[in-house]
Amino acid sequence: MPVLAINGGEKTRTEGWPAWPPDDPGFLENITKVIESKVWGVSGEWTLRAQEMMAEHHDARFAAACASGTSALELALRAVGVRPGQEVIVPPYTFVATASSVVAAGAIPIFVDIDAETFNIDPAKIEDAITDRTAGIIAVHIGGSPADMDTIMEIARRHDLKVIEDCAQAHGATYKGRKVGAIGDAGAFSFQSSKNVTSGEGGMVLTNDPDVYSRAWSVINVGRVPEGGWYDHRVMGWNLRMTQFQGALICRGIELLPGHFELRAKNGDYLRERLEEIDGVSLQKLTHPDNVSAFHLYIFSYASEAFGGLSRDRFIQALGAEGVPCSKGYNPLYREGVFSDKVHMDQFPFCEPYYAGECDYSDVVCPACESVCDERGFWMSQRTGLTDDQAMDDIVDAMLKIKANLGELTEA
Ligand SMILES: Cc1ncc(COP(=O)(O)O)c(C=O)c1O
């Protein structure tokens, strides 16, 4: 009789995982208030309140709400002064928007490898990538776990570069006791459906710099300036405004965030501890022991040699069958079609450097990122952490069960 669920045995976990977005009456209450207010868009109170709450929660002076995390990144890059033709250093282990926003700002993403254990950009490799065209660095707090900000800021200041934090996955995360978002020159947040605070779609730029704020605000508001009139368009801008409905959902989401954050972190700590029982699986390492991850993702590192050579892909198939759903996650961004196939670029004038042959990622090799993407990395979503010790035990027990029954598994 087979034991592993993938072969027809009993599942380790039969209970499901929590829903996301969470069931909470506060969302509906706020949305109803927006409907009744008759102010659904510009000049409403809810986006202003969402900005205030996000800024306060992240110890930032200013917040500018916008349409998405992708637009927040592009706005942040423009607002800190990144110009066409300049280069911006980014990690290749992240969502595509981290790099495509650089292209949208007319600049060129330069990929720098990640650290194999923290999965964040490896600061030791940044300086080799700096040229006289480098304007900035995007520090992605991947999975919600803060990048090594002190080292990144020190390098940036020494080379007169701007730092953008990609906080799309890191609402409320702390780096050495300090909230992420305004440690660098600007921080970009996302409120897309899966995010730890969500309004379906939406984004926000946080900063302590009044000029960065006002430039971002202008691009969001069709080129108006904060101190100017309605038909007073002084800079080139788009309409990237957030609706009051999104603002209302975010306000409730930020109220729920501290409780969710604490629960995800508590479960993350317990999971980390229990994983010590398994040779060959561990959780993403923090860049500093005092950091607290937002655990948007529970990112695992897998060593197939500790599982008799069982591939990561087969391991996560078996885990899924046990009731523990996992994803193998990203591909190295420089391998994605958008960066490797220049044909797609020629419809966008700002991609000139690509089809002029200036940008060619075919020789880029980031060994740590490739080993994580191809063989070692996998993750579970933030819903995983909105559970209890039993759920964490189920994850570890499923892994132990697979290890004890490796003989049942052949590669698919
Ligand atoms: C790391 C990272 N950066 C940027 C984004 C883009 O955010 P959005 O989907 O809101 O445009 C996302 C999420 O989707 C992300 O995970």
Image (cartoon, grey):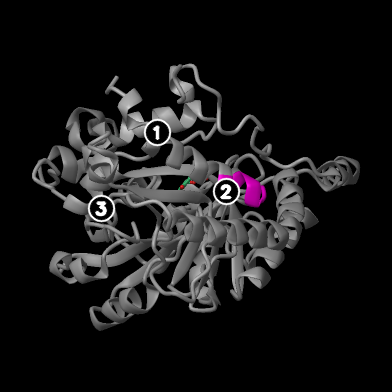
The magenta segment = 386-393
Q: Are marks 2 and 1 in contact (CB under 8 Å)?
A: no
Identify the residue at image location x=55%, y=27%. Answer: 11
- Give the alpha-carbon distance from disc 3 to disc 1, as whole Å: 32 Å
Mark 3 residue type: Pro
Can you identify the residue that label 2 sits on?
392
Residue drawn at x 57%, y 48% as measured from the top left: 392
Amino acid found under the numbered disc labelled 1: Ile
- Sequence-wise, the earlier of marks 3 and 1 is 3
Residue 250 placement (x, y as % from top left): 70, 52
Mark toward the start of the polypeptide (3 vs 2)? 3
Task: State the residue position of label 3.
Answer: 109
> Which mark is in front, 3 or 2?
2
Packing grade of label 1 (10 A; few <14, some 14-19, many >=20) is many
Q: Is residue 389 magenta?
A: yes
Find out whether the residues at labels 3 and 2 contact each other: C-beta distance under 8 Å. Answer: no
Q: Is residue 280 left or right of residue 335?
A: right
Mark 2 or 1, nearer chain start: 1
Residue 316 numbered tag: 1
Q: In which quadrant will I find the C terminus?
A: top left
Q: Tell whether 4 sits left or right of 55.
A: left
Where residue 63 appears, as percent x and y from the top left, is 60, 65
